[in-house]
Image (cartoon, helix red, strand yellow):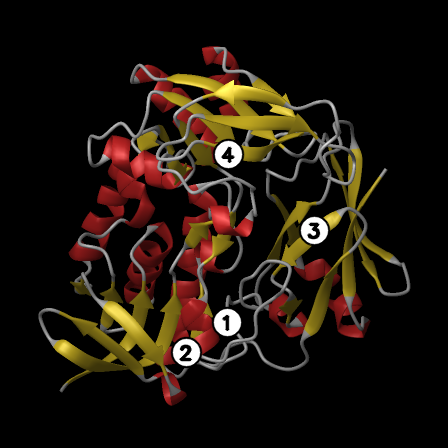
């Protein structure tokens, strides 16, 4: 059996994995490797042929493949090797990795530091419990995206899209451009779950019917989807009697949310946050298992690839420092809690002592949209306001970033926990 030793190992080669590997090398790690289970580097970016990537990182409006190619080139330039078509089977004690591929068979990797960058996956039909038979013609939006953009195959002619996530809205436009008809997009919430720009550019600009507070209550068809039954829902998300109507179609796409891919994290014994479904991390993106860092959508689902990349650059930097034996922030960990109208906050704990070295960014999502001016407040457990920032609006689909400056170091040293609120 082959045995590989390295300073930093990155699992996954999407935008997070590539950026983390590049930064780890740039931060002094001499031997950095990437393991990728697909045939090529780039992750989901390779099938995202629409633009909108890299506006902040590269100051350019790029497609997904263009964005991936720039990072693949950067990784190659700094001498980071990769193994594709490689599956990680196990993360054992002391960061021992068991993996397999057709080139080496079963092999082990012993890194000094490990970065998890496996991305996220789509929520499938099985998680929705939609009544009906099991005909052909039901796909997640991401699967349909790959079929159309990579395989050159149209999965249907008449579509209904359940959910208003970004991939679903982007595919509504893509399918329309390919000559298909999108009969309806149904969203169970009273607001869209994706970015507002995609609502405008992909749904409204193409006159695609969007029904809020609406869901699929039945799939009809024996061998192939023939129609779906839509119904309005009440405030408890239950169908309202008498509001159902049938929509003929041959394909149903599901765009009902993304879940951080953390099966390997569980194998490694990393505690996961039940709200984000990602690891608990500190300001260095370090997990509760020493030497293991997490970056990108593994931690929580981002809306912009530039934010994914920036989190990965940070994880790569601190993973390299750990591998080289440099001390990371230590001492007391201060819990960061979600308060009023806040769904979650990342990182979930910070070292107050770290503020003496640099500012710390908190990333959060709200539970409910507020389309008017609000205040984001950070308070102590007793309610004392440490920081207040006015926001024009807040939406669950748009991540909010707040910076803790060194001026708060003394207050945080004395606090037992801090809470983030969205207040009127």
Residue carrying label 3: 343
Instruction: State the residue lying farthest toward the left.
Output: 103
Q: Callout 1 environment at 10 Å: few (<14), some (14 to 19), or many (20+)?
A: many
Residue carrying label 1: 286
Say which label, 2 or 1, has the lower sequence index.
1
The image quarter containing residue 407 is bottom right
Gap in Å between the C-alphas at discs 2 and 1? Answer: 10 Å
Question: Quick one: quadrant of the N terminus?
Answer: bottom left
Position of residue 75 relative to residue 28, above or below, is above
Q: Callout 4 environment at 10 Å: few (<14), some (14 to 19), or many (20+)?
A: many
Gap in Å between the C-alphas at discs 1 and 4? Answer: 44 Å
Gap in Å between the C-alphas at discs 3 and 1? Answer: 21 Å
Residue carrying label 2: 322
In front of the other: 306 or 244: 244
Residue carrying label 4: 219
Say which label, 1 or 4, has the lower sequence index.
4
Would you say 398 lies left or right of 117 here?
A: right
Residue 320 visible: no
The reply to whether dot 2 and dot 1 touch (C-beta < 8 Å) is yes
Gap in Å between the C-alphas at discs 3 and 4? Answer: 32 Å
Which mark's residue is nearer the viewer, 2 or 4? 4
Image coordinates of residue 102 in percent, x first then y, are: 11, 69
Question: Quick one: quadrant of the C terminus?
Answer: top right
Say which label, 2 or 4, has the lower sequence index.
4
In front of the other: 260 or 365: 260
């Amino acid at each position: 059996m082959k045995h590989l030793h390295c300073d930093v190992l990155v699992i996954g080669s999407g935008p997070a994995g590539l950026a983390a590997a590049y930064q780890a090398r740039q931060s002094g790690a001499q031997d950095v490797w990437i393991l990728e289970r697909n045939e090529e580097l780039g992750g989901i970016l390779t099938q995202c042929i629409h633009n909108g990537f890299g506006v902040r990182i590269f100051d350019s409006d790029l497609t997904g493949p263009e964005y991936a190619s720039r990072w693949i080139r950067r990784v190659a330039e700094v001498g980071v090797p990769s193994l594709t078509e490689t599956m990680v089977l196990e993360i054992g004690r002391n960061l021992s990795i068991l993996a397999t591929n057709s080139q080496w068979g079963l092999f082990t990797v012993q890194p000094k530091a490990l970065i998890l960058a496996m991305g996220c996956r789509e929520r499938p039909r099985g998680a929705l419990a939609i009544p009906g038979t099991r005909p052909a013609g039901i796909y997640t939006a991401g699967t349909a995206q790959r079929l159309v953009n990579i395989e050159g195959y149209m999965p249907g002619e008449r579509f209904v899209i359940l959910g208003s996530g970004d991939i679903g809205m982007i595919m509504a436009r893509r399918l329309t451009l390919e000559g298909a008809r999108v009969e309806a997009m149904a969203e169970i919430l009273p607001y869209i779950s994706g970015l507002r720009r995609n609502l405008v550019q992909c749904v409204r600009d193409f006159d695609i019917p969007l029904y809020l507070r609406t869901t699929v209550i039945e799939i009809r068809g024996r061998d192939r989807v023939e129609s779906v039954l839509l119904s309005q829902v009440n405030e408890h998300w239950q169908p309202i009697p008498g509001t159902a109507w049938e929509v003929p179609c041959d394909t149903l796409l599901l765009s009902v949310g993304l879940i951080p891919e953390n099966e390997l994290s569980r194998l490694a014994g990393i505690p996961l946050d039940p709200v984000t479904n990602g690891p608990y991390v500190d300001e260095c993106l370090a997990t509760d298992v020493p030497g293991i860092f997490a970056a990108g959508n593994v931690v929580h689902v981002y809306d912009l690839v530039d934010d994914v990349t920036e989190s990965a650059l940070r994880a790569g930097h601190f993973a390299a420092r750990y591998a080289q034996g440099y001390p990371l922030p230590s001492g007391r960990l201060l819990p960061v809690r979600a308060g009023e109208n806040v769904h979650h906050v990342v990182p979930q704990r910070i070292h107050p002592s770290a503020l003496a070295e640099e500012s710390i960014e908190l990333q959060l999502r709200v539970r409910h949209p507020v389309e008017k001016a609000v205040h984001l407040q950070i308070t102590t457990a007793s309610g004392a306001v440490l920081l207040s920032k006015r926001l024009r609006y807040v939406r669950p689909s748009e991540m909010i970033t707040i910076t803790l400056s060194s001026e708060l170091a003394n207050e945080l040293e004395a606090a037992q926990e801090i809470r983030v609120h969205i207040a009127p």
